[in-house]
Amino acid sequence: MMVEIYAGKLPWSGVGDMDAALRWKKDLDSKLLLDNGQPIPAILLANKSDLENTLTTQQLQGQVKKGRFASGFKISVKNGDGIDTALNSLLMSIVSNERHSLYLIPMIQRDQEVRNLASEEEENIDKKNQRRIRRLTDGICC
């Protein structure tokens, strides 16, 4: 059972974990969608691209399509290849969804069973900041 809420996610699996990644993605999609009904951005990473016996690009793209991932990337944690490109892709998807207001209502406000894990101190700071912003913007005409 997943206990975290994500704006975007990238599963990190080792060689041979493709079935586990596909099961994880199916579980994620069954529990969390964007406001337009589409899955949240998730990318599939094929690690160990520095080794000879790795997944082909065609195989990777087939798994991306099968799992409904936003995209897939060959990476090498050992030498850092592809990691920046993969993370940039995920972040661009998240930012694009935010710009299109697809995270319009935070999950905590939609579902009574979801609990906010922020500490009471963090919540008080957030409330103070909201009051400060309201004071600063009062009387500003558009």
Image (cartoon, helix red, strand yellow):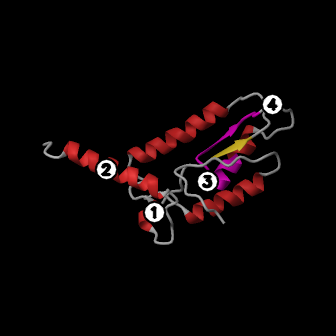
Counting residues from the N terminus, which is met first, the one under dot 3 or under dot 2?
Answer: 3
Residue 130: mark? 2
Residue neighbourhood size for the residue with mark 3, other residues' Cα within 10 Å, grouped as few (<14), some (14–19), many (≥20): some
Which amino acid, mark 1? Ile
Q: Quadrant of the N terminus?
A: bottom right
Which residue in the structure is indicated by mark 4?
50
Which residue in the structure is indicated by mark 3?
68
Q: CA distance from mark 2 to mark 1?
A: 18 Å
Asked if residue 93 lies left or right of residue 126, the reply is: right
Name the residue at 84% across, 33% down: 51
Which amino acid, mark 4? Asp
Q: Is residue 138 magenta?
A: no
The residue range painted magenta reads 62-77
142 or 127: nearer the eye? 127
Name the residue at 52% across, 51% down: 7
Q: CA distance from mark 4 to mark 1?
A: 41 Å
Q: CA distance from mark 4 to mark 2?
A: 49 Å
Residue neighbourhood size for the residue with mark 1, other residues' Cα within 10 Å, grouped as few (<14), some (14–19), many (≥20): few
**Tag 3's secondary structure?**
loop
Residue 108: mark? 1
